[in-house]
Image (cartoon, rainbow, N blue to C red):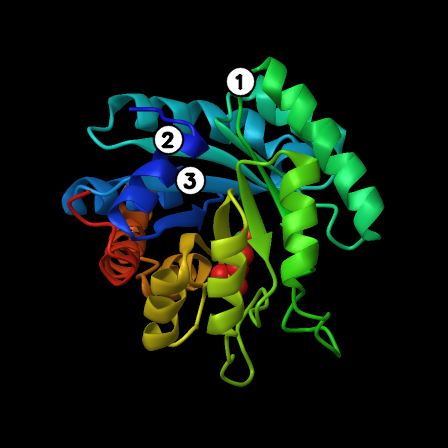
Amino acid sequence: MLADLKYVLKIADEGSFAVPAFNVYNMETVMGIIKAAEMKKAPVIIQSYSRLFTSGNADYLAPIVLEAAGKASIPVCFHLDHGASMAEVVKAIRCGCTGIMIDASALPVEENIRITSDAVRICGYAGIPVEGEIGHVGSVKDDMMSPFTQVAEAVNFAESAGVAAMAIHVGTAHGRYKKEPKLDISRIREIHDAVGPFLVLHGGSGIPDDQIREAIAAGIRKVNIGTDVCYAFLDRVFETSRELVAIDLFMKDAIDSVAEFAASRIDLLGAGGK
Ligand code: 13P
């Protein structure tokens, strides 16, 4: 069933686990994620980067996700990831998203709050819960990490912006880590104890399992996983024989590879059977 962001995160909060939020790009990645979620009986978030909404890819992808979610026996949220501006937010509403992220985290805090509040107001008219970001989770390619999210700024953001969920910067980055990340677990716990919105961990690919478990125990309720979905899919595509010309048959193993990977993350996040 299609469910909204708040619905799936509430289940996670009540069960003290985290919902995996997998970034998808095409029908095959959606098929792999749904296969794993059904197999594990897990709530799941299927999300796409803002770029896919700008480029028009989401016009094709959204009906696939919505159809898959509608048929699924488990709750599936369709989420805009890192919404870059109000243009993408409105596009995501039109595409049927049931969760929307607006990311103004690279801007000064007051501007971040203003833009995020605007998105919350507009999405509120459509009944869609919003994720914001306070503190800026960068990329593994950045020369330097931004400062980690302060507890006080997290409290101010939660109270002022009215978000349902908030991404915080506690030592992760987007992409494949060059060296092992070291998450600030006590900071997660302090922020969790101080704010109402559900906490989101970005940059979920390649974080050591024990740190993921500790982050969830400290209060993380959504873990974003993008890069490793791409590798699960592409590595298998590159291994697939060129003798297989019919594209549906060619894609079969790559779909299974995504499903296998997604199932392993569902287990790690404790989302199976929930
Ligand atoms: P990774 O690509 O590092 O898994 O990060 C995904 C993410 O945080 C999407 O918002």
Whether residue 203 appears in this view of the structure is no
Nearest the eye: 217 or 28: 217
Tell me the SS state at disc 1. loop
Label 3 to label 2: alpha-carbon separation? 14 Å
Q: Residue at x 57, y 72 (%)?
A: 171
- Disc 2 marks which residue? 7
Q: Is residue 1 left or right of residue 142?
A: left
Q: Earlier in the sequence, mark 3 or mark 1?
A: 3
- Disc 3 marks which residue? 46
Q: Residue at x 65, y 40 (%)?
A: 159
Q: Are marks 3 and 1 in contact (CB under 8 Å)?
A: no
Q: Is mark 3 within 8 Å of ligand 1?
A: no
The quarter of the picture where residue 121 lies is: top right
Q: Amino acid at mark 3?
A: Ile
Q: Position of residue 34 (x, y in %)?
A: 28, 39
- Disc 1 marks which residue? 127
